[in-house]
DNA sequence: TAATTCGGATACCGAAGGTATTTGGAAGTT
DNA sequence: AACTTCCAAATACCTTCGGTATCCGAATTA
């Protein structure tokens, strides 16, 4: 392996730390993951971590943004496919199973959001911004879906998107607490919603 | 004030600590509230706290159970009144505003649940038990309400109760993060649900 | 009144986030 | 090529906090 320049070396360190932090944060959560553990698992000292990320909050936020970006990407892929309505619903169900059904992810996002809300108004606003982005993306998907199916939804899409997002968060949290909980509440509610729109306002 | 026996004195200390802990936990959350702060705010030493509650988790769990009992009591009062359907819906809206709309409570319950889920399987199960109790209470109320209005709900009441509970949790969390969020998503969804049942299966 | 029990106080420990300082090697200068 | 500069990373250390061990003194009991 060729000798690295200082910038390359630092970038590599940063990436290694990020990947390690991601694994640990998702596995153990925010509070149970220590900077020392991240450093050690990545083969560095704590100083290396603090030299690349100002605080634990920064590191965790970077991890969360990376994971969230992937999830958003995947839900768009799932919903924008060319299949039938049923196929898209199935793709969404699979997506929600992978995302909401993943306790590590759900718990981490909620844990960090709560931590931010309590500790630092600026960080809370950044996290809330992420929430609005989610809501906006959902709204877009809802509108596309309504257009494709040629139906009018019984509530404004913004309100529905907020409700669906909240439902997903709540379901994810409760399933993380109690794995016995039914897994398909979200898809069945969405089906109900589409059903309702259908009957009510089909053109 | 008469001299207290030792048992009375300890009970008084315990109540004082519980009340103080409740105030602090609701105001600052689980992690930001320290045993030392609780002790000092109540006018005792840390030793007094640990002499009455084995761990911080025990103390917080006791607080949460007390608050939750009050909320359950209040939602039953709101829904079991003798008013019309609209009045009951208004009472529920007021209840949800006071409960879900209270960031301190919502954040604390979620924060503690997540903490329990990550740290201690036994504690997680106890918290999950509380969740099932909530869900069961909601289911009861839904069934009563459906009976009173003489309509059949479009999904099993257990599933609906789970969904409503999850929605409430998610909405509460998101509102705590972003106060700009619409406050009446929950009532408007319930209205929609009743509406749908009404149209679909009125006898 | 003397002995005992026990609620609460005090002293201390280890872990964790964060800071100050040091060091070793890459980049720049002559 | 030798020397200086600079900065990523290492090390040492600080504070805070949950928890434990020990101690004290007042209420209880013999």
Image: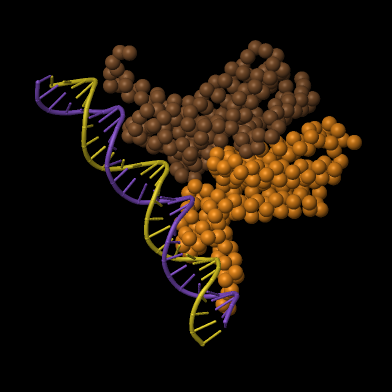
Chain colours: A orange, B brown, C purple, D yellow
Q: Quadrant of residue A121?
A: top right
Residue farthest along the right direction in this orientation = A203
Residue B153 locus on image (x, y percent): 71, 27
- Relative height, residue A84 to residue B94 (above, below): below
Residue B172 locus on image (x, y percent): 62, 33
Residue B178 locus on image (x, y percent): 65, 37
Residue placed at 68% from the left, 40% from the top? A165
Q: Decide if residue A114 is in sight here.
A: no
B158 and B73: which is toward the camera: B73
Residue B13 locus on image (x, y percent): 36, 25
B136 and B39: which is toward the camera: B39
Residue placed at 77% from the left, 20% from the top? B203
A69 and A142: which is toward the camera: A69
Query: Which image quadrant: the C terminus of chain A?
Result: top right
Q: Decide if residue A24 is in sight here.
A: yes
Query: Which image quadrant: the N terminus of chain A?
Result: bottom right
Residue placed at 72% from the left, 22% from the top? B151
Residue placed at 77% from the left, 45% from the top? A141
**Is B105 on the left-hand or right-hand side of D17?**
right
A37 and B191: which is toward the camera: A37
**Is B59 on the left-hand or right-hand side of A152?**
left
Tell me how many marks there are: 0
- Relative height, residue B100 to residue A136 (above, below): above
């Amino acid at each position: 392996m060729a000798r690295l320049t200082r910038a390359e070396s630092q970038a590599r360190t940063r990436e290694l730390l990020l990947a390690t932090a991601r694994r640990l944060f998702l596995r153990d959560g925010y509070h149970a993951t220590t900077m020392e553990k991240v450093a050690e698992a990545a083969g560095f000292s704590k100083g290396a971590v603090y030299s690349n990320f100002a605080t634990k909050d920064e590191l965790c936020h970077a991890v969360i943004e990376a994971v969230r970006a992937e999830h958003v990407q995947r839900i768009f892929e799932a919903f924008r496919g060319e299949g039938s309505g049923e196929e898209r619903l199935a793709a969404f169900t699979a997506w929600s199973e992978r995302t909401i059904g993943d306790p590590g992810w759900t718990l981490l996002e909620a844990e960090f959001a709560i931590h931010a809300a309590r500790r630092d108004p600026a960080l809370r606003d950044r996290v809330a911004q992420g929430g609005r982005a989610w809501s906006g993306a959902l709204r877009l998907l809802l509108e596309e879906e309504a257009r494709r199916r040629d139906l009018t939804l019984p509530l404004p899409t913004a309100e529905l998107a907020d409700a669906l997002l909240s439902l997903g968060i709540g379901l994810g949290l409760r399933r993380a607490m109690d794995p016995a909980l039914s897994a398909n509440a979200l898809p069945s509610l969405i089906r109900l919603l589409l059903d309702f729109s259908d009957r009510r306002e089909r053109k």
